[in-house]
Image: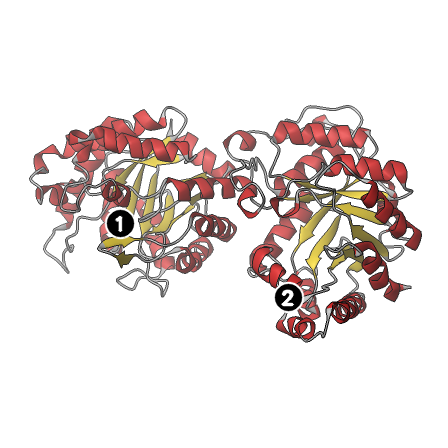
Amino acid sequence: MSKDTFLQRLQETVLVGDGAMGTMIYSRGVFINRCFDELNLSNPDLVLDIHKAYVHAKADIIETNTYGANRIKLKAHGFEEQVGLINRRGAELARQAAGPEIFVAGSMGPTGMRIAPIGTLAQDQVLDLYREQAQGLVEGGVDLFILETFSDLNEIALAVRGVRQISTLPIIAQMTYTEEGKTTLGVEPETVVELLLAEGASVIGANCSVGPQAMLEVIARLAKAGAPYISAQPNAGNPRVYEGRVLYMSTPEYHAEFARRFITAGANIVGGCCGTTPEHIKAIAASVRAMQPRKTASSVVFKSAEEITVQPLPRQEKSALAARLGKKFVVSVEVLSPRGIDVQSVLSGVRKLVGFGIDAVNIPDGPRASSRMSPMAMAQLIERSSPVETILHYCCRDRNLLGMQSDLLGNYALGLRNILIITGDPPKLGDYPEATAVFDVDSIGLTRIVRGLNHGHDVAGNPIGAPTGWHIGVGANPGAIDLDMEVERLLQKVEAGAEYILTQPVFDVKKLEHFFRRIETVQIPVLAGIMPLVSYRTVEFLNNEVPGVEVPDSIARQLAAAADAEEAKTTGIHIAQQAIQESRQFNQVKGLYLMPPFTKDKYDVAIHVLEVIR
């Protein structure tokens, strides 16, 4: 693949790097006194097997096992005359595992010696060392170079210059940073960007040394400093010694979460360093897919709008709910599909709600990754049996792009009109942790796809004839731990085509107020999420088992102090009614999204709570 192919891919999508090589080799029983780079010659099957594991984990970039394969480091093991052979063979092994579709990056690390004038290694010698190593990697067929774990800015600048003297392939230049956000020699990220871009680096990044949390600020600073492309490959936390073994404790899920944060901060490449494994990379790859289309999906580009002259429906004409939003205070209530096929109790509950006068029924799509009757089927049954519209929750977890489009077209043809697009909880949170998640796109990407259908073209840009008229809703969490990320993603959803917002449960009106200040430029209606809490046990469940929901201590204490279940229910209803009244003070709030408790009398509780708006 050409350098233009790699840089073009970076313009289109986020790429996933692989994880550790050294700690993976060590975990296979190779002692640290061995020359890991020489294993390319003496034990190529071991190296190839590790590469294949990262390919299987869906890495887009595979690094060669040549991090220490420069003349100085190889000399310590007596292999200084095999620099070219070790690097060439390392590139060939990585290419064998990667095939033609995955990028191979020639890994190059520091010499381990101080550069003059601080040290004794002359700058001309440094240039010779890196030219020699790069030549072997080029002969082996690498697509790009990755210079990693450098602490000396002068040395990595010389390394970039040396590579540039023999190759025009892209260069990822990564330094290692401390908890204070500087290199170990005290250089600021802004200075790193300026110098390395001048030397010819294509991507500026950070790797090793620290875990994901400390690296996040560095990535944001690199972006603000003007780095055109940015890479983030943290360790799996700080290592610990346990029973004589060096262990890294950060979980794959933790790295996947921070991969999303790195991308939001500006990263174009996310991966791992010491202690990360194929499991970490697999989780990161799934996380990247959840934020945007990956390789296949990124090539799905809508044809130019000029070619499609379909006039989309105005929002107010898309559904009865769309027509009411902004003209009256609307109320929607969440109704769960049954775990089996008996829908009578659900339909009976909906009739009660309709009798009260609600405007819509929300139907979650596999909430908390649980298995229930299809929300699409449930929505059809409800709309056929009661004079009320549904809001179909639709998540990206369980269907690929083809399945999503089929669902959206079919259900629109059957009469559904309101949709809430969500990314979806990962399967590990639910009843079937071994289930496979798809995540071809996340909620932002799917919003764009539905907007395309509303403009008369499918996911590949092909005309579909008459356009759909989906009323597009998205979710938001005013109490998100990383509110910057939440706001940024919401703004992207609105830009992608969102027409209304449903929030996670609001328990603290101050957080809601702060959230609205952050999104004051957003002019679409908001339905504030309200969840009656009828027991302290529910509080414990939400705080510990439901991602993105946090019940304040003040509310928890009130429910804990209840003398019995009936008093707890009364207290919970009162708290929910108070939240409704407080939410209505904000101009952005045009309605409610009520989530009843998981109790047999949930519909009666919902109606009791809603009495406050009469």
State yes or no: discs 1 and 2 in contact (Cβ < 8 Å).
no
User: Which quadrant of the rendered structure holds the N terminus?
Assistant: top left
Determine the CA span between mark 1 and mark 2. Answer: 50 Å
Q: Is residue 18 above or below residue 119?
A: above
- Mark 1 or mark 2: name the one nearer the start of the chain: 1
Give the labeled residue for mark 1.
Answer: 157
- Which numbered mark, 1 or 2, is in the foreground of this view? 2
Find residue 100 and report its image quarter.
top left
The reply to whether residue 340 is visible in this rendering is: yes
Q: Total number of numbered labels?
A: 2
Mark 1 lies on a secondary structure that is: helix
**How far from the left and from the top, in percent, is residue 249?**
36, 54
Q: What's the amino acid at mark 1?
A: Ala
Question: In front: 94, or 530?
Answer: 530
**How far from the left and from the top, in percent, is residue 381?**
83, 36
- Mark 1 is surrounded, within 10 Å at the Cα level, by few (under 14), some (14 to 19) or many (20 or more) other residues, namely many
Residue drawn at (61%, 44%) of the image: 369
- Mark 2 is surrounded, within 10 Å at the Cα level, by few (under 14), some (14 to 19) or many (20 or more) other residues, namely some
Q: What's the amino acid at mark 2?
A: Val
Question: In front: 331, or 520?
Answer: 331
Label of residue 257 in the image: none
Label of residue 551 in the image: 2
